[in-house]
Image (cartoon, grey):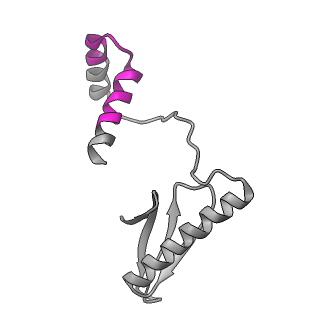
Amino acid sequence: MNTISYKGYLGTVNFSEKDACFYGKIEGIDGLVNFEGESVQELTEAFHEAVDDYVAYCHAEGIEPHKSYSGQLNIRIKPETHSRIAALAKQAGESINAFISQALDSRVAAML
């Protein structure tokens, strides 16, 4: 999936052949904010304007602009992987949750 970023916000980008335009929405917020443009330049400008307008709206209304997450995540993995994680966590003297959380933190940090 194609994305665009501005001021810490992420937008998904799609193309409509029928309408001959790019369109997208701001991700990671509780509302639905769309943007569109007929060129990459127009799309980028529309995205920046949408983010700026959304942030201004949230500020005026006293709303937290970023979506809140609970910190709980349920994932499905292969039983063999689960078993290996349990063994590695035990060897490290930590819980499976702590082991997975550290592994995810490391992966996310490496991608930033």
In the rendered image, residue 49 lying in the magenta stretch gets the answer no
Residue 22 in view (yes/no) = no
Horizontally, is 5 left or right of 54 in the view?
Answer: left
Viewer-closest of 40 and 48: 48
In the rendered image, residue 91 lying in the magenta stretch gets the answer yes
Rendered location of residue 25, percent (x, y): 52, 68
Q: Quadrant of the N terminus?
A: bottom left
| 21 to 27, vertically: above or below | below
| 27 to 44, vertically: above or below | above
Kindly give the residue lying farthest to the right in the view shown: 61
Horizontally, is 64 left or right of 51 in the view?
Answer: right
Magenta span covers which residues? 87-106
Viewer-closest of 86 and 79: 86
Q: Quadrant of residue 53?
A: bottom right
Give the residue at x 34% y 23%: 99
| 46 to 56, vertically: above or below | below
Rendered location of residue 63, percent (x, y): 69, 53
Viewer-closest of 92 and 58: 58
Rendered location of residue 91, percent (x, y): 25, 11
Give the residue at x 45% y 57%: 8
